[in-house]
């Protein structure tokens, strides 16, 4: 097969599925062939290396479809000299692969590997027998089937490496139906546990564990499948107490992966593992992790690490010390920054004793860390130890103990004193706030604003012990919620009403508006911590913050559009001062705009250092996003603050409290500094907030949607879910306004990348008819001024999957778009090259162009006939490779038939120009016939794009 592929490279390149399947197979076989000492395999091994390297260097764009398992396979061959440079480029120089859109290895991590690649590693016979065991063999009666399977497929030393392939197949490619899940058939986790016991060598065991947990590390709720990660958790839970050593090894391996698999992308791995645990417990695979964290059979240090990493699901563990709220905060802070688990505050002696317990629990624990180093993405391949070397076995006892920093050796007395101080500070704040909120509603809001500011902004050198410690802000958020509830003060309440001219009371003067104003002006990480805590308590913080930002932008836009014609735009704050004595209704309309700045008297009370930090941030915003006034900067900061909040949600925890500086100032307008994978995660939370707003009020949602395409284009433009939400909720009046904005280029909905637009159109074919019609009218308004090159590429890509008789709305929308275009040589050739099922469609487009500008249309046809094509050669590649078809039923023949019918209805005077066009078309048909005759009968059917 390798010789066939190598000698037919051109054919292989045209069949990308075969190409990637061959790469997956040979990359998987190479480590096995390197372990073989047979001289007969040397030449084959060399040819495999050359073949794989050629694909990776020349066709890496096609390889991206393999997904995360491509990285897993490349790790096993990274020590081979020919693959070292590929591995280094993958980690530090992705541009070397010349793959469009590929800029980081994390983009491969988040792509789930299709099942066909994992299934291809099993022979049909092996797949049949393993599926038989998983669908027909009862639990308790599997022994003889397993024995037979081992004797049939795993009876040789070299066959041991198939365990990894079997585990990946069972996890990802075999998902039993509910009938089997509810029966007494042997579950997948039991078969995987048996396969792990079949591993004799340490490196195969490490590979098998990595195969089991690989989807955990990069789990994405939107694209990954729960069934892929279910067996690992069930195996750990059900192995206690009989096979506790297996549970111990798997848990420790998981923690090693979280911290050391790819240190440079630890945040992505932490997010993947926490998302895996979240969805497994949310869907009821297990009720909690208490069975692990409270098990007397697991080592104490391992249980403690489990509680530190996943405190939410271990809080009921028996026999463990109660985790305080400050400890939970510390863990959440760690998750947000995605660093290693918080340091233990035990003595060095206790730590060593715990690790001694770990050594006694698992016989293979000593080898785990050393073998895991061979799987660490961050380490250079040239420095890894050779698989199976004697050094690996001899140093196992030394590697098991982690390096202890001074932070790990903090005394219990110091920790106790710190906790007492934090508790005292929290109690003082609690009492002060309770007193402040006892006045009227307005007085309570003003008092809360002052309280919040004084506790957030403190001098860096004058801490007298009365200010809150960083970790107590989680507790503060919870206490504030309870105090507000006792005083009947609403916080982040739903906004069911909506009026474009009149603000609700909660949008003007409320605790919610105070918090949002403080956060959007300061970007204070402690305040962000509190917002995330409120979100965790069930408040619609994200939706309210999005509404707040959009209200500011809406009122600034409304004010400017209603200003006097020809007058210079004024700042809204100036407008507010000039109209201070107007009626309550008018003043209420601009009251939210006055929230751009804090009250002057409050500024005097706050520390100057805080406002210096805020001014630095505002200057950074103005540098990145040039603005006409301070209101523009404030709006940009609001949306940037909302984006930071989404990032905090995505990180599942708190944020750094080391300073006020914002590292994401480049995210304001066009999304610079955000990777595509991170943008997908933020879109997930944005969609949730939009759906909450939809439940409140459809007009409110529509007002938000029209603004976020401008202020959050990196999250909204071209996104299928956002666009579908838009077209499924808007009414005709709103649609007319949006259509005008698109025509005037005030915003973009679909965006420019052709691949994303093609995917959007293809997925929209499953939408309702009305939604498709709205979508295409918006696309036509946005694309009506696109260049002929872009329109030509769009038409060619759409013709690949559109069927005129099935996709009526899409074809009608495409026809409407083309009828607005100006006829050019490139556009006419593109239409004439359409398949035969687009013949009437093409004739309709050509007829429209001819009626609009007959002279120019005739000139373009003449250029095509005389071969005087004023286009770049690469743009006419389709015309050169696939000449225009003039046979019966083709677009050209159908257009000729249309001209003949048109001539019968015209008078003699108007026939002159039409006759010239018809004569030119007939010449073109004759050329087509001569081309077919010269090329022979084999080319007559080439009517492709």
Image: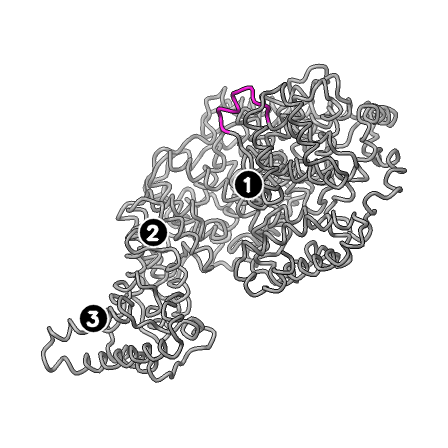
Q: Position of residue 596 (x, y in %)?
A: 48, 46
Left or right, residue 925 beside residue 648? left
Q: Earlier in the sequence, mark 3 or mark 2?
A: 2
Q: Position of residue 314 (x, y in %)?
A: 65, 22
180 drawn magenta: yes
Residue 463 drawn in magenta: no
Q: Which residues are magenta?
A: 177-187
Q: Position of residue 880 (x, y in %)?
A: 43, 75
Earlier sequence position, callout 1 versus callout 3 = 1
Q: What kind of secondary structure does the magenta stretch mostly adopt?
A: loop
Residue nearest the observer in this picture, 920 or 718: 920
> At x 72% / y 51%, what residue is drawn?
30
**Earlier-in-chain disc, 1 versus 2:** 1
Residue indicated by mark 2? 775
Badge 1 crowding class, 10 Å Cα cut-off, few under 14, some 14 to 19, many 20 or more, is many
Left of 331 or right of it: where is 622? left
Is 127 drawn above or below residue 135 in the view shown?
Answer: below
């Amino acid at each position: 097969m390798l010789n066939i592929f190598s000698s037919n490279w051109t054919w292989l390149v045209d069949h990308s599925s075969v190409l990637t399947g061959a790469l997956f197979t040979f990359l998987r076989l190479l480590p096995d062939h390197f372990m073989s000492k047979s001289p007969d395999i040397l030449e084959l091994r060399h040819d495999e290396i050359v073949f794989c390297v050629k694909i990776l260097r020349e066709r890496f764009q096609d390889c991206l479809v393999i997904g995360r398992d491509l990285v897993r396979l490349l790790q096993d061959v990274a020590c081979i000299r020919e693959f070292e440079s590929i591995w280094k480029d993958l980690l530090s120089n992705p541009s070397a692969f010349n793959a469009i859109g590929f800029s980081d290895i994390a983009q491969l991590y988040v792509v789930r590997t299709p099942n066909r690649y994992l299934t291809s590693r099993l022979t049909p016979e092996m797949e049949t027998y393993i599926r038989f065991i998983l669908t027909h063999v009862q639990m308790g009666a599997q022994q003889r089937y397993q024995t037979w399977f081992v004797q049939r497929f795993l009876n040789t030393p070299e066959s041991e490496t198939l365990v990894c392939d079997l585990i990946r197949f069972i996890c990802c490619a075999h998902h039993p139906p509910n009938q089997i899940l509810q029966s007494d058939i042997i579950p997948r986790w039991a078969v995987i546990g048996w396969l792990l016991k079949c591993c004799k060598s340490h490196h195969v065991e490490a590979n098998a564990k990595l195969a089991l947990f690989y989807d955990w590390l990069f789990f994405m709720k939107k694209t990954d499948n729960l069934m892929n990660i279910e067996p690992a958790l069930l195996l750990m839970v059900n192995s206690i107490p009989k096979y506790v050593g297996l549970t111990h090894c798997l848990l420790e391996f998981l923690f090693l992966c979280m911290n050391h698999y790819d240190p440079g992308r630890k945040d992505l791995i932490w997010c993947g593992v926490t998302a895996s645990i979240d969805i497994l417990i949310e869907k009821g695979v297990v009720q909690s992790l208490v069975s692990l964290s409270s098990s007397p059979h697991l080592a104490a240090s391992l249980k403690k690490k489990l509680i530190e990493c996943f405190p939410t699901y271990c809080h009921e563990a028996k026999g463990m010390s109660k985790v305080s709220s400050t400890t939970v905060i510390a863990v959440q802070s760690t998750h947000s920054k995605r660093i290693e688990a918080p340091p233990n505050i035990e003595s060095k002696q206790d730590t060593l004793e715990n690790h001694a317990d770990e050594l006694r629990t698992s016989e293979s624990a000593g080898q785990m860390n050393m073998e895991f180093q061979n799987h660490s993405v961050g380490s250079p391949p040239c420095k890894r130890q050779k698989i199976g070397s004697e050094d690996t076995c001899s140093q196992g006892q030394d590697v098991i103990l982690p390096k202890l920093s001074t932070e790990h050796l903090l005394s219990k007395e110091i920790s106790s004193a710190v906790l007492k101080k934090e508790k005292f500070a929290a109690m003082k704040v609690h009492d002060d706030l309770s007193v402040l909120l006892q006045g009227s509603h307005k007085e309570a809001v003003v008092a809360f604003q002052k309280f919040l500011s004084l506790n957030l902004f403190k001098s860096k050198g004058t801490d007298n012990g009365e200010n809150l410690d960083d970790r107590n802000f989680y507790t503060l958020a919870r206490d504030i919620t309870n105090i507000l509830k006792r005083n009947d003060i609403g916080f982040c309440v739903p906004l069911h009403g909506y009026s474009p001219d009149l603000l609700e009371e909660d949008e003007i003067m409320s605790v919610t508006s105070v918090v949002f104003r403080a956060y959007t002006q300061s970007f204070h990480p402690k305040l962000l911590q509190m917002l995330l805590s409120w979100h965790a308590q069930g408040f619609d913080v994200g939706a309210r913050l999005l509404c707040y930002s959009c209200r500011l932008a809406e009122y600034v836009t409304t004010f400017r559009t209603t200003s006097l014609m020809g007058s210079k735009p004024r700042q809204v704050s100036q407008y507010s001062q000039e109209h201070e004595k107007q009626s309550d209704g008018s003043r209420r309309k601009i009251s939210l705009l006055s929230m751009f700045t804090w009250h002057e008297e409050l500024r005097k009370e706050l520390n100057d250092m805080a406002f210096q930090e805020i001014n630095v941030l505002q200057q950074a915003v103005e540098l990145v996003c040039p603005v006409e006034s301070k209101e523009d900067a404030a709006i940009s900061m609001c949306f940037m603050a909302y984006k930071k909040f989404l990032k905090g949600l995505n990180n599942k925890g708190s944020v750094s409290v080391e300073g006020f500086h914002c590292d994401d100032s480049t995210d304001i307008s066009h999304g610079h500094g955000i990777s595509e994978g991170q943008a997908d995660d933020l879109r997930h939370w944005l969609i949730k907030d939009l759906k909450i707003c939809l439940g409140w009020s459809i007009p409110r949602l529509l007002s938000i949607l029209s603004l976020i395409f401008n202020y959050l284009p990196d999250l909204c433009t071209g996104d299928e879910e956002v666009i579908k939400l838009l077209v499924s909720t808007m009414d005709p009046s709103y649609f007319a306004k949006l259509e005008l904005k698109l025509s005037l280029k005030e915003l973009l909905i679909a965006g420019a990348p052709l691949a994303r637009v093609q995917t959007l159109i293809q997925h929209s074919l499953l939408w309702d008819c009305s939604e498709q019609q709205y979508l295409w009218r918006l696309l036509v308004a946005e694309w009506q001024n696109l260049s002929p090159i872009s329109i030509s590429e769009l038409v060619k890509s759409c013709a690949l999957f559109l069927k005129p008789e099935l996709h009526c709305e899409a074809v009608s929308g495409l026809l409407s778009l083309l009828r607005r275009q100006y006829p050019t040589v490139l556009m006419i050739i593109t239409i004439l090259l359409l398949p035969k099922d687009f013949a009437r469609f093409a004739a309709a487009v050509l007829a429209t162009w001819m009626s609009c500008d007959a002279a120019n249309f005739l000139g373009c046809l003449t250029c095509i006939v005389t071969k005087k094509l004023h286009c770049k050669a690469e743009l006419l590649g389709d015309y050169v490779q696939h000449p225009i078809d003039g046979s019966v039923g083709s677009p050209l023949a159908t257009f000729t038939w249309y001209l003949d019918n048109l001539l019968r209805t015209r008078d003699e005077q108007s026939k002159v120009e039409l006759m010239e066009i018809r004569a030119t078309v007939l010449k073109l048909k004759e050329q087509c016939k001569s081309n077919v005759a010269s090329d022979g009968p084999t080319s007559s059917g080439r009517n492709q794009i």
